[in-house]
Image (cartoon, helix red, strand yellow):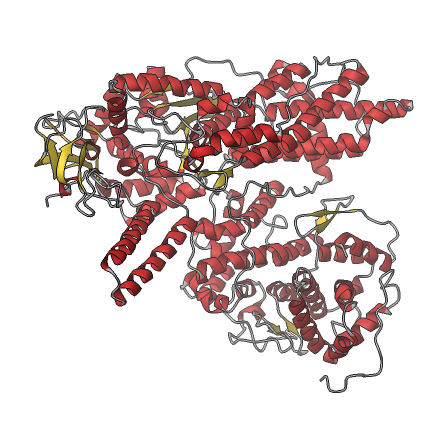
């Protein structure tokens, strides 16, 4: 999904009605938002955080210093690790790491739903769609988290809903 | 503090610098043990473990956390910098550090991968005109970026001085106390090597940015505009022609004027006995011409001079070959040079020559002053002397049997068969090349310039000159490496007749060696142009000297001449900006040095391709910062896409709309916010053009012209004036505005294009009837120079399509047939006799490649010896090895030898 499309999705999820126009720059097709007052903004997470503030939903950026830092940590992870790593191997390492991280967590910051969850969900969608049933089960914590986020009100939009099976099929896989 | 870090950061990581530099006191109390995040597969440092058990595993997140703790609120601009740091800067920086620390590479090999990122920071700082990234005060963004950059930039070699805004930003931060402390703790005085253990564990960077030979432009980034910038652009536009200053009156001769900017421009003097080829032309005269024309457009008081370098062995040999006297050879070839440069439209104020009485006078004066001040040494050298001709023989005037391989016609400096370098006195059965009699070995005196004694002055001068100047990185690098290796005395005399006589008893038969007096040619050429030449050349306070050359000429202009001038103690004007190009290759890199075959200036005329197209393409591929390659297909492509479809198409359409829809009169313009935004975009690009040309980034500045024209094309395409002209009143007004704005952009382009394509520029200006002052002055703002009601002239197409078969036949003619393999397009300025005078300093990659080959060949030889292989076979492989070593020495720019013969101690 192109960054501009993703930001439009985010706008809808946040209940922003206006609909910004985005251009893309550079070989990584970094999104650029031309704001009305002041200079334009460049970068997916930068624009995303800006939109969150515009929608008066600052809580999505975290409430304490620690939570804010963790949100940003995962946003950075999103643009440096998830984007640009498309080899099968990389993705599996990434899912393995995330799976281990999410073992004791509901959301990326722990107990609160944040922008990090939204952008990781959007960023991972294209990979999760292609996982086999067995793989989904292998990354059980990721699957649980992903399934949860896709059912979070207003987030999924037109993205396809990924099916996860509740019953375990491969009992030996762990 | 509520949260504390138990396991701090590993110090073996560039990022941790940022951490320790953070203003929070907790930051300094962190431990130094490794902490690997349990859920991450790849080792990652630094890491901060929070009391909650959670981890922060990137430097910016950690720094952000400390800033948040101290009450800071996140803002868009900081977010943007941190995201840029993570996604753009870090990958480039890790690659650079990896090349530097793990692979031991140097110079441009390291800098190449981060240059774009560094330039981006520099532009951002200089554009917003603030000392720090996010404004007037230091912020999180500064700390994070400084910490990331510190390991590399702490070595001044990797902090390009031309990026002055970056430079001062980095210096300011580096002198702050917390930053200094952090740097000491982390790098522990080992400098960047402290990072080695960490970097070695990292994967090799996947894609070093396209540093190979490439002619593709760097991508154009969409500029970001503020309301303020737009408002300023609109105001400037509205002021129009009024804001143009009066034209400077033309002077003859051009002399420095107190209180003005006085720019003296030289291009390396081409050696007279060769017809210059495309490489020579782009390497010096054409590059200098663009800058000289630009300088005049800025109304700077400009003198641009060049001339032919006429003395030396090569001329004498050539004279013998052609059965003429050296003077006749020089006269003949001087005219050929002058004609070619005239065809290429090179705007010299004077194009002189070095064989003049002024040359003798000034050279001898400098020599006398050096002699009186004790900077000239005398030494005895054993050399061959022909009794019959009654003279000592320069290496090129002796032939004999090679002492190594027995080849009968070995030259005095090198054997053509085995390729080994030869000491002329070691030749068996030596023969004088002129009379064929056998010379004898005799002692003779030579004079040496005592460079070691002048080294300190040179370093002081460089220390004053380099910072903030526009010396190209390769010029800095070459100069620095010569100084690092220590200077040695250099012989300044030769046993020739064709040269400047040495005014000293006992040296009546000798002349000055060309590399001592060729650079003095600039002075004597000026002296022949005006008797007040000293106002240019003994006036360092008022004159800005720009010298253009290919990089093999850097030692003479950056070391040798400055030493002579400093030692002469006569207040000479020394080079302020030394602009050196890399090499231009031919097609896919095939070229041969030996036969003197190439695409020559006079042949370019016969191709039927206009001079301006040649100029455009050569400047488009100017080897600026890296080698580039001339390619016929690319020439066709660039002509058809950039000139015909982009630039030509836009300018022609703008003019045609005025003629067809508005009867040749520029229509009224009522600017909408979109138009204003376009004005600001064009202004920004124009300013970028100025910034680049002020730094002599000629090739990059050309891209700005093409970018503006692309903006223009898009603007026309989106607004469709050809449809609107048939519409309602409002539509017709809109068509008028679009046409008016477009034709004004065309007018601006014609001026910006002037340094690159003077003839095309003049054609456009004639077609648009651009008022004279607007033709000759380029301000930093985009003005409305064709106001409503202005009548334009007749518009016609500017460029012609190049056809495939036309280019194919040119390729056949110049690159095909028997001569195909023998093109020499190295952008050398003075193709002097190879062994005696050339100092070729190859790129680091070439050197590395040669080193690898030497190692490989060495192994082959060792293996063969171990196997007790056939003697001849071993000898053959050894010869290959020696040849490679020799190539390596040449590539490393080892100084050329003093006259052959054993020096008596």
Picture coordinates of residue A37, whole percent (x, y)? 77, 44
Residue B348 visible, this angle: no
Picture coordinates of residue B425, whole percent (x, y)? 13, 40
Work out which quarter of the rendered image holds the C terminus of chain A and state it.
bottom right
Q: Pick the residue in front: B584 or B573.
A: B584
A166 is higher (above) or lower (below) than B687? below
Query: Which residue: 47% across, 20% down?
Result: B347
Picture coordinates of residue B791, whole percent (x, y)? 73, 12
Query: Which residue: 36% across, 59% down?
Result: B856
Q: Pick the residue in front: B554 or A41.
A: B554
Residue B437 visible, this angle: yes
B679 is higher (above) or lower (below) than B117? above
Q: Write down the quadrant of residue A47 in the picture.
A: bottom right
Q: Pick the residue in front: B163 or B207.
A: B207
Picture coordinates of residue B577, whole percent (x, y)? 42, 35
Question: Relative to residue A149, is residue B576 drawn left or right?
Answer: left
């Amino acid at each position: 999904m192109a960054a501009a499309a993703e930001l439009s999705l985010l706008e809808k999820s946040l209940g922003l009605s206006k609909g910004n126009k985005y251009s893309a720059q550079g070989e990584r097709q970094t999104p650029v938002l031309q704001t009305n007052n002041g200079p334009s903004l460049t970068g997916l997470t930068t624009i995303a955080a800006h939109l969150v503030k515009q929608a008066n939903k600052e809580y999505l950026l975290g409430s304490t210093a620690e939570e804010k830092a963790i949100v940003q940590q995962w946003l950075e992870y999103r643009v440096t690790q998830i984007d640009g790593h498309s080899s099968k191997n990389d993705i599996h390492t990434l899912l393995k790491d995330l799976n281990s991280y999410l073992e004791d967590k509901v959301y990326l910051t722990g107990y609160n739903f944040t922008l990090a969850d939204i952008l990781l969900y959007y960023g991972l969608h294209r990979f999760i769609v292609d996982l086999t049933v067995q793989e989904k089960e292998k990354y059980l914590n990721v699957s649980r988290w992903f399934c949860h986020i896709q059912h979070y009100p207003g987030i999924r939009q037109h993205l396809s809903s990924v099916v996860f099976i509740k019953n375990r099929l491969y009992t030996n896989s762990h | 503090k509520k949260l504390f870090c138990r396991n701090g950061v590993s110090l073996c990581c560039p990022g941790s610098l940022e951490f320790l530099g953070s203003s929070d006191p907790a930051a300094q109390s962190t431990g130094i043990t490794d902490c690997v995040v349990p859920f991450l597969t790849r080792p990652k440092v630094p890491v901060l473990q929070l009391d909650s058990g959670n981890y922060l595993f990137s430097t910016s997140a950690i720094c952000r956390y400390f800033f948040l703790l101290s009450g800071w609120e996140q803002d868009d601009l900081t977010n943007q910098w941190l995201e840029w740091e993570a996604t753009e800067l870090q990958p480039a920086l890790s690659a650079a550090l990896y090349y530097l620390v793990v692979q031991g590479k140097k110079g441009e090999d390291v800098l190449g991968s981060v240059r774009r990122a560094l330039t981006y920071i520099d532009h951002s700082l200089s554009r917003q005109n603030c000392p720090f990234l996010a404004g007037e005060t230091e912020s999180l963004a500064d700390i994070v970026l400084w910490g990331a950059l510190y390991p590399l930039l702490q070595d001044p070699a990797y902090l390009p001085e031309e990026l002055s805004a970056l430079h001062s930003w980095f210096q300011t931060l580096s002198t702050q106390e917390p930053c200094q402390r952090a740097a000491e703790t982390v790098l522990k005085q080992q400098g960047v090597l402290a990072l080695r253990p960490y970097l070695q564990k990292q994967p090799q960077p996947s894609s070093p940015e396209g540093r190979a030979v490439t002619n593709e432009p760097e991508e154009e980034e969409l500029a970001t505009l503020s309301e303020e910038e737009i408002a300023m652009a609109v105001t400037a536009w509205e002021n129009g022609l009024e804001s143009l200053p009066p034209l400077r009156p033309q002077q003859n001769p051009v002399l420095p004027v107190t209180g003005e900017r006085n720019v003296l421009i030289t291009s390396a003097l081409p050696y007279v006995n060769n017809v210059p080829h495309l490489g020579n032309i782009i390497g010096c005269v054409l590059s200098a011409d663009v800058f000289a024309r630009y300088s005049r457009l800025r109304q700077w008081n400009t003198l641009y001079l060049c001339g032919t370098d006429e003395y030396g062995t090569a001329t004498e040999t050539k004279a013998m070959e052609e059965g003429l006297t050296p003077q006749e050879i020089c006269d003949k070839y001087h005219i050929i040079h002058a004609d070619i440069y005239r065809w290429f439209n090179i705007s010299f104020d004077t194009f002189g020559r070095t064989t003049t009485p002024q040359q003798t006078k000034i050279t001898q004066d400098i020599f006398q002053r050096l002699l009186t001040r004790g900077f000239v040494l005398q030494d005895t050298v054993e050399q061959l002397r022909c009794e019959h001709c009654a003279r000592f023989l320069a290496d090129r005037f002796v032939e004999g049997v090679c002492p190594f391989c027995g080849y009968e016609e070995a030259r005095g400096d090198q054997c053509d068969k085995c390729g080994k370098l030869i000491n002329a006195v070691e030749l068996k059965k030596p023969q004088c090349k002129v009379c064929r009699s056998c010379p004898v070995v005799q002692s003779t005196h030579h004079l040496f310039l005592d460079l070691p004694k002048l080294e300190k002055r040179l370093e002081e001068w460089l220390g004053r000159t380099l910072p903030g100047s526009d010396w190209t990185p390769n010029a800095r690098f070459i100069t620095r490496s010569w100084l690092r290796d220590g200077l040695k005395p250099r012989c300044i005399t030769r046993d020739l007749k064709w040269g400047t006589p040495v005014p000293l008893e006992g040296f009546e038969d000798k002349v000055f060696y060309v590399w001592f007096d060729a650079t003095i040619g600039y002075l004597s050429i000026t002296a022949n142009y005006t008797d007040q030449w000293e106002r240019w050349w003994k006036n360092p306070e008022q004159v800005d000297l720009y010298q253009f050359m290919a990089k093999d000429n850097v030692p003479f202009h950056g070391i040798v001449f400055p030493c002579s001038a400093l030692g002469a103690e006569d207040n000479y004007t020394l080079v302020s900006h030394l602009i050196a190009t890399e090499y231009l290759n031919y097609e896919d890199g095939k070229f041969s040095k030996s036969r003197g075959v190439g695409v020559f200036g006079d042949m370019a005329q016969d191709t039927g391709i206009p001079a301006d197209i040649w100029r455009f393409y050569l400047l488009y591929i100017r080897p600026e910062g890296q080698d580039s390659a001339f390619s016929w297909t690319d020439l066709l492509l660039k002509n058809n896409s950039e000139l015909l479809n982009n630039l030509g198409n836009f300018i022609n359409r703008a003019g045609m709309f005025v003629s067809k829809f508005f009867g040749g009169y520029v229509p009224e313009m009522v600017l909408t916010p979109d138009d204003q935004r376009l004005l600001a975009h064009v202004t920004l690009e124009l300013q970028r053009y100025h910034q680049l040309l002020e730094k002599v980034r000629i090739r990059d500045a050309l891209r700005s012209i093409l970018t503006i024209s692309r903006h223009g094309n898009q603007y026309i395409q989106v607004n469709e004036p050809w449809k609107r002209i048939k519409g309602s009143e409002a539509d017709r007004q809109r068509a008028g505005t679009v046409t008016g704005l477009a034709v004004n952009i065309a007018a601006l382009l014609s001026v910006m294009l002037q340094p690159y394509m003077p003839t095309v520029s003049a054609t456009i200006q004639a077609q648009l009837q651009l008022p004279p002052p607007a033709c000759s002055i380029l301000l930093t703002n985009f003005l409305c120079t064709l106001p409503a009601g202005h009548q334009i002239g007749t518009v016609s197409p500017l460029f012609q399509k190049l056809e495939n078969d036309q280019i194919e036949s040119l390729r056949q003619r110049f690159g095909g047939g028997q001569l195909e393999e023998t093109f020499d397009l190295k952008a050398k300025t003075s193709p002097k006799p190879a062994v005696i005078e050339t100092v070729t300093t190859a790129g680091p990659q070439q050197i590395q490649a040669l080193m690898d080959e030497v190692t490989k060949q060495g192994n082959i030889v060792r293996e063969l010896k171990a196997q007790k292989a056939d003697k001849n076979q071993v000898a053959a492989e050894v010869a290959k090895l020696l040849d490679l070593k020799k190539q390596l020495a040449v590539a490393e720019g080892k100084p050329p030898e003093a006259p052959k013969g054993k020096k008596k101690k």
